[in-house]
Structure formats: C-alpha cells, structure tokens
Image (tube, rainbow, N blue to C red):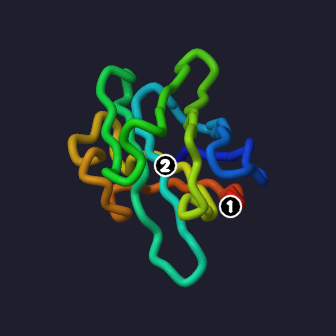
Amino acid sequence: QVQLVESGGGLVQAGGSLRLSCAASGGTFSNYAMGWFRQAPGKEREFVAGIRWSGGHTYYADSVKGRFTISRDNGKNTVYLQMNSLKPEDTAVYYCAADREAYGSSWYRGRITDFGSWGQGTQVTVSS
C-alpha cells in the first residue's frame, strides 16, 4: 500500500496561489491514479481533482476548474496541486489519495471509496 505525505499548505490572501505536493512511498506510484480531496469544517470531504496514472488525463470539480491544476512526476513519486486565484471558500484541509486499484478505471468519478491510501492532510487557509 502506498504511503502519502502532503506539504505546501499555509495561509494566503484571496487571489493568491499555493502549490501542494504529495510524496508517495512504499508502492509503485506510477501504477495508480491520484486524487486531491478537501474537507472544510463542518462539511463532508469532497473531490477536488484527479489524474490518471500516466498523467495524460485529468478531471476537476466544477468549483476549481480553471483555477487549480493537478500534475504528477512519476520519476519523483510526487503529485502536485497548483492552486491559483484562491477564494476564502477554498479554505479546508487538503488530502491526497491513491486509487484503490492499480490502473483503476473509476478514479475520475471522485468517489472517496475508490481511493485506498490517504495522506494526513495539509491545511489551506484563504483570508478575505
């Protein structure tokens, strides 16, 4: 099973940018689609973005389309989330996750149950 560690969170003003990183170990990273999720206080965890194992296909929640970009570097076992034009409503704990199955075909649906390994999360706070 893949172990995941997120970094890059912090406090930023509205309109600013942050780049989150998620380093993977303990598995064959390049075999797994990856996703970013977030959870705001009092709300359920929600899908933000996903990327196929090869990096050739990405999928985004409507709320972040055009502002966030997911990417991966299989040589570094790392997935990234570039967040631009941040809004206060983007404030949340951000989690990266690995698909439950190698070469899985359901990752783009953004369902929590399709992801089997999770990081500990990194806090993103956007001030107005």
Q: Residues within 10 Å of mark 2 (few under 14, many from 20)?
A: many
Task: List the single residue furthest toward the top.
Answer: 75
Residue 57: horizontal and vertical position, in percent? 29, 27
* Residue at point 58%, 48% (across, down): 86
N-term mark: 2 or 1: 2
* Residue at point 60%, 29% (across, down): 78
The type of residue carrying mark 1 is: Ser
Which residue, given by chain and number where applicable, does mark 2 sit on?
36
Foreground residue among 104 and 58 = 58
In what element is the residue under mark 1? loop
Residue 35: horizontal and vertical position, in percent? 44, 45
Question: In the picture, which quadrant includes the C terminus?
Answer: bottom right
Q: Is residue 53 above or below residue 76?
A: below
| Quarter of the image where one finds residue 17 | top right
Foreground residue among 65 and 39 = 65
Q: Is residue 30 above or below residue 26?
A: above
Which residue, given by chain and number where applicable, does mark 1 sit on?
128
> Along the horizontal axis of the image, is 3 left or right of 72?
right
Foreground residue among 17 and 104 = 17
* Residue at point 55%, 56% (across, down): 118
Foreground residue among 11 and 8 = 11
Q: Is residue 25 visible?
A: no
The type of residue carrying mark 2 is: Trp
